[in-house]
Amino acid sequence: MAKPRKTRGESLVLRYAVLGTWALICLLPILWFLSIGFRPRTEVITPEPIYFPTFSLDAWHLLVSDWPIAQYLRNSIIAVAGSVVIDLILAIPAAYALSRYEFKGREDIGFYILSTRMMAPAIVAVPIFFLFKTVGLLDSVWALMLIYAAINLSLVTWIIRSYMLDIPKELEDAARTDGASDLRILWEIIIPACLPGIITAAVIAAIFAINEFLFTLLIASTANAYTMSVALANFTGGSDGIIYNAIALVSFIAFVPILILVILIQKHLSRGLTMGAVKG
Amino acid sequence: MASIQLKNIVKRYGAFVGVQNMTLDIADEEFLVLLGPSGCGKTTTMRMIAGLEEPTDGEIIIGGEVVNEIDARDRDVAMVFQGYALYPNMSIYENIRFPLRMRGIPASEHDARIRKAAEMVELGSFLDRKPGALSGGQRQRAALARAVVRQPQVFLMDEPLSNLDAKLRQSMRVQIKHMQRQLKVTTVYVTHDQIEAMTLADRIVIMNKGAIQQVGTPDEIYSDPANTFVAGFIGSPPMNLIEGNAQNGRFTAPGVSVPCPAHVRGSVTLGIRPEDCRVGGDHVQGQVYGVEPTGDVTYLTVLAGTKKIEVKAARDYRSEIDVPIGIAFDPAHLYFFDESGQRIRGAE
């Protein structure tokens, strides 16, 4: 006897149920800290369950009045955007050379660039601190910009390189016989052709930079250079104790730009990540 | 417009020899086809003429000037690629304009030249599209327009039709030939398709394993092959090559016995084209292996010993398999090759 077959509709319902549950599990922490962020502080730390939470902008008022949150956000944006620009300026020509020119030790150089990524950041933390102290860049947004750029340069180079490898060699041959110089080819043919890769690399670098904590903590000591990621830590101590609702709200504010970036490049993100990380 | 000379061109990749000691004169306005199986060095030769690859040894002369040291972008050479190589981010208009911009041709001339080139390949109404929105044939026509727009000294075409379907290939072939005659630009065309070579070329260069096998007009290549490689490569189906023995004016092989010139002796190969074989006769005694009607002609395969012999039979010829059959060869069109594969000429 034949088994009763599932109709298309039934299996679709099942599929949505499974995916929906999974999405809910993933979204729950985000919804949770959003809800914490908009509740009064007393309600957040009460041991009894609360079924109908009170909506409150306490945390928001606290942030705006007591903390230079706009300054933190601005620091984050300047340091991150600047680092991405530096990365692209350096990585695009490097990736082009690594993907196209034949030269001795090309593979070794490529691997060496990637290997800088494998080092535990803590190992270089102390030298970096003294380096920036010597050049007088402690507690400065510019220092953060340089550090973020350095951290992500290898990854950005590697991702862009993998996209450039996919561009048919014929395209460059055609441009060359059409009379274009190397620089023209890079600018007019290669960069437009691997623009999705460049954007992906830039967004990934931006996400890593926004989340960077260790070096930021090391370099930044005042609101001059505090970014969103380090500012979060400021709410956990001091005479006020741990201000949970403010932390939740700042987390959310820090999270939104990343969310927007990820949505923008959703299509390319997984490819960028796996290529950068896995493909040799 | 220019002639091209290749003088003792060698291209080595480490121990591998891509092109060995190639010498060739290409006349001004000539349509020359480099024909050979893949890996025979024909594309490498073309890329060296373009300047995309450097010869290991030898001289390349275009229009009387040695160009070995001249970069690809400064040689006045336009190339059409197998994969079209259109710039995906630019419209067709911008694609065709690219070489004009790169070569510093005054912007005031661009529009007229682009439109003229596009008209020539019947692509006038697609100028604002991106390459991705065009079919394969349209893309290849756009690539052709990009090549002709700047009126180069030399056209190089690297298997430009091999990504197209058979019907389109035929119409593009005619278009390319028409264009070449119209523009009178020296053209080097690489292909592995003998039909393309035969239909397009003023002269064909047949290459194998990096070396020239024969240079000649399509007629010469077809009716006067220099060796078994050329004989077996040209023709569809290709020439039958039957290994056997010749002595006392008779060539014999299992199932085959044909009179041959007296000076042909010893272990030789007999070549006979399918259209020079006739059903009925006693040069070959074998069985019918297969019959393939194509409409205008029927191909018959005869098994003689272990050798399959192709015969072009009358269009209405039909037979069951394994039926005994006799085949006659046209004695005026027998070719003999020695053990090294070279043609045995002389009093034939």
Image (spheres, rainbow, N blue to C red):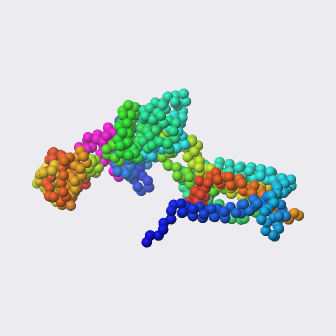
Q: Is residue B163 visible?
A: yes
Residue found farthest to the bottom? A1
What residue is drawn where x is 61% and y is 50%? A198
Q: Is residue A159 visible?
A: no
- Residue range corresponding to the magenta coloring: B198-226
Q: Is A177 located above or below residue A75 in the figure?
A: above
Residue at image position (42%, 32%) is B120
A261 vs B265, nearest the viewer: A261
Quick one: B203 or A246, which is closer to the camera?
A246
Picture coordinates of residue B225 (x, y %)?
Answer: 25, 46
Residue displayed at 26% across by 50% down: B237
**Residue A32 point in image, percent of width and height:** 74, 62
Labels in figure, total:
0
* Frontmost residue, B45 versus B195: B195
Apparent side of residue A163 relative to residue B190 in the rendered image (left or right): right
| Residue at 57% in and 62% down | A13
A159 sits left or right of B216 in the view = right
Q: Give the percent coordinates (x, y) of residue B317.
A: 18, 50
Nearer to us in this view, B317 or A149: B317
On the image, which quarter does residue B159 sit in?
Answer: top left
Task: Name the quadrant of the C terminus of chain A.
Answer: bottom right
Q: Horizontal placement of A12 versus B62: left or right? A: right
Residue at far right of view: A239
Q: Quadrant of the N terminus of chain A?
A: bottom left
Q: Position of residue B218 (x, y in %)?
A: 28, 41
Q: Is residue B157 magenta?
A: no
